[in-house]
Amino acid sequence: MKNYRITVNGNVYDVEVEELGSSVLAAPVSAAPTAPKKTVKKEAKVQSGGAEGAVKINAPMPGKILSVKVSAGQAVKRGDVVMILEAMKMENEIVAPQDGTVATINANEGSSVEAGAVLATLN
């Protein structure tokens, strides 16, 4: 048996999977959602001399940047759309995680990005 933790739309599921050697079928053991884990983020320190901001906006999945909605130096509020990322033929809004000023834009329109890539930074 192998245990996996899968997150779907913010819900965390603990799943146990049995490897099969022949034609025997196994039923799922546990498919009940568990409480989502809350992540505590540390307060970001503002960089005074560098160009890169303290708050990073990362790509949640691999895809292609369709458009960049902000520019460096622009003030944004939490939830403002920063970029549009196309993944699996769907347009996904990449939003600002908190209020701040855009320090850098690290992805251009039309560029492909990997999951976890830093798209922009905020101060």
Image (cartoon, rainbow, N blue to C red):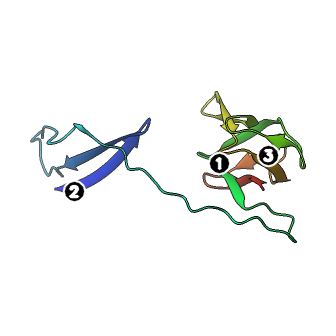
Residue type at numbered disc 1: Ala
Q: Which is more toward the observer, 6 or 49?
A: 49
Viewer-nearest residue: 112 or 45: 45
Query: In the rendering, which numbered label is found on residue 59?
Result: 1
Q: Position of residue 63 (x, y in %)?
A: 66, 42
Give the mark count: 3
Left or right: 28 in relation to 37: left
Question: In this rendering, which labeled residue sits more in front, label 3 or label 1?
Answer: 1
- Residue 123 is situated, as x and y percent measured from the top left of the image, at 78, 56
Q: Secondary structure at mark 2?
A: strand
- For label 2, the crowd category at 10 Å Cα-Cα, with few meaning under 14, some 14 to 19 and many 20 or more, is few
Question: Residue at 76% across / 64% down in the picture?
Answer: 46
Quarter of the rendering containing residue 117: bottom right
| Residues at marks 3 and 1, CA–CA distance in whole angstroms | 12 Å
Residue identifier under label 3: 111
Q: Position of residue 97 (x, y in %)?
A: 65, 45
- Where is mark 2, residue-wise? 2
